[in-house]
Image (tube, helix red, strand yellow):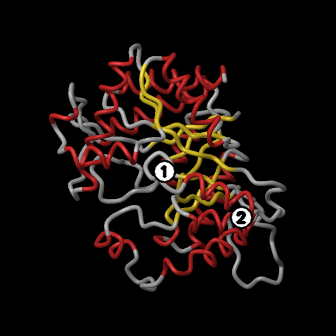
């Protein structure tokens, strides 16, 4: 099974954005050597702990620093953008780096509503409601050149950049199935509808010029370390970050703590742990076992690994442990 990597370009406490980009570049090079198939970056805004806001720009940098790994967006939040400009940006990336570029599309704003309004200044207030039409329009700008069309994307036309639909609910599953596109489910933070979404996608899938049969990818958190105890400690960074985001207090990526129960109220911790259930945490042996259980239960066509870990070296080691486990499964 192919395994890929989702990087949020984290900015840890005690660090700054330039270092985040250096860390992501290092991770991408290592991921290529470890056999990861894709390296995806995600669009988020107004979040001090995530540096991938200008997603297409960072994709270009990562692609320039690697040789063969696919690089793409997981994803671009399409309601924030004109489809035409997304086509030009990703057509440019494809012209520069060939058939290595992926374009995952999400329907959420990737930020709070006040920031979303700043992003969409001058755009229609109901832009989210046009998501299916925007996806179709964007695919058209990336597809074969129509000599009769009055509006064409240069670069863009004929690049045929693969488009994915991202989602955490049944909406994206239904749309991906209807359009015959690959589907990636955000099970790393919103696993509640995972089983139902995969069932809907596979049952309703319509073969298309892009895809003959369904192709579903699920996201899994991995917090791998030499011991179970250290893996559990590494996970406390993500637990704290997720809790702060839910409480409307996003910040830089927190340092890990020895006992997460001392830092989060029981109700908050319970909610965070429920959101992070699709995770593998611990020693290499434990990570391999838990990944095997997740893959056996959900039977995805591909898996994308993520993990918000404060220390860069520990983060590298965690992704290496995940790759070693997935190679062996």
x, y percentage for residue 107? Answer: 51, 67
Q: Secondary structure at mark 1?
A: loop
> Percent x, y for residue 53?
40, 55
Closer-to-camera residue (134/18): 134
Residue 195 position (above or below residue 137): above
Task: Quadrant for the N terminus, please.
Answer: top right
- Label 2 sits on a secondary structure element that is helix
- Say which of 14 and 254 sits in front: 254
Q: Earlier in the sequence, mark 1 or mark 2?
A: 2
List the residue tagged with mark 2. 177
Who is closer to the viewer here, 58 or 298? 298
- Within 10 angstroms of label 2, few (less than 14), some, or many (20 or more) residues? many
Is residue 230 placed above or below 79 in the rendered structure?
above
Q: Nearer the viewer, mark 1 or mark 2?
A: 1
Residue at the image position 44 percent from the left and 23 percent from the top: 224
Q: Name the mark on residue 191.
A: 1
Q: Quadrant of the C terminus?
A: top right
Q: Position of residue 222 (x, y in %)?
A: 46, 32
Residue sitting at x 48%, y 40%: 278
Q: Residue at x 49, y 64 (%)?
A: 77
Q: Residue at x 62, y 26 (%)?
A: 326
Please give the label number shown on residue 302. Answer: none
Task: Name the quadrant containing residue 229.
Answer: top left
Q: What is the x, y in percent for residue 70? A: 65, 41
């Amino acid at each position: 099974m192919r395994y890929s990597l989702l990087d949020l370009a984290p900015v840890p406490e005690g660090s700054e954005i330039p270092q985040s980009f250096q860390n992501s570049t290092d991770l991408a090079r290592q991921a290529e050597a470890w056999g990861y198939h894709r390296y995806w970056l995600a669009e988020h805004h107004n979040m001090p702990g995530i540096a991938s806001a200008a997603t297409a720009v960072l994709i270009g940098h990562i692609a320039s620093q690697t040789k063969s790994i696919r690089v793409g967006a997981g994803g671009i939040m399409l309601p924030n953008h004109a489809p035409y400009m997304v086509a030009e940006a990703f057509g440019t990336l494809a012209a520069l780096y060939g058939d290595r570029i992926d374009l995952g599309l999400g329907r959420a704003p990737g930020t709070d509503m006040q920031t979303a309004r700043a992003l969409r200044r001058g755009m229609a207030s109901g832009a989210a409601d046009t998501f299916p039409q925007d996806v179709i329009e964007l695919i058209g700008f990336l597809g074969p050149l129509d000599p009769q069309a009055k509006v064409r994307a240069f670069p863009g036309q004929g690049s045929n950049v693969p488009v994915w639909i991202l989602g955490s609910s049944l909406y994206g599953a239904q749309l991906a199935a209807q359009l015959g596109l690959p589907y990636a489910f955000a099970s790393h933070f919103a696993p509640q509808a995972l089983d139902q979404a995969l069932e809907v996608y596979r049952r309703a899938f319509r073969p298309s010029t892009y895809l003959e049969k369904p192709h579903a990818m699920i996201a899994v958190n991995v917090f791998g370390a030499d011991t179970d105890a250290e893996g559990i400690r590494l996970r406390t960074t993500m637990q704290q970050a997720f809790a702060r985001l839910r409480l409307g207090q996003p910040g830089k990526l927190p340092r890990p703590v020895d006992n997460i129960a001392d830092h989060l109220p029981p109700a908050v911790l319970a909610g965070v742990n429920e959101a992070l259930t699709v995770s593998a945490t611990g020693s290499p042996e434990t990570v391999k076992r838990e990944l095997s259980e997740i893959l056996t239960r959900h039977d995805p066509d591909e898996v994308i690994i993520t993990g918000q870990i404060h220390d860069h070296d520990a983060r590298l080691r965690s992704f290496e442990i995940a790759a070693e486990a997935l190679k062996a499964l």
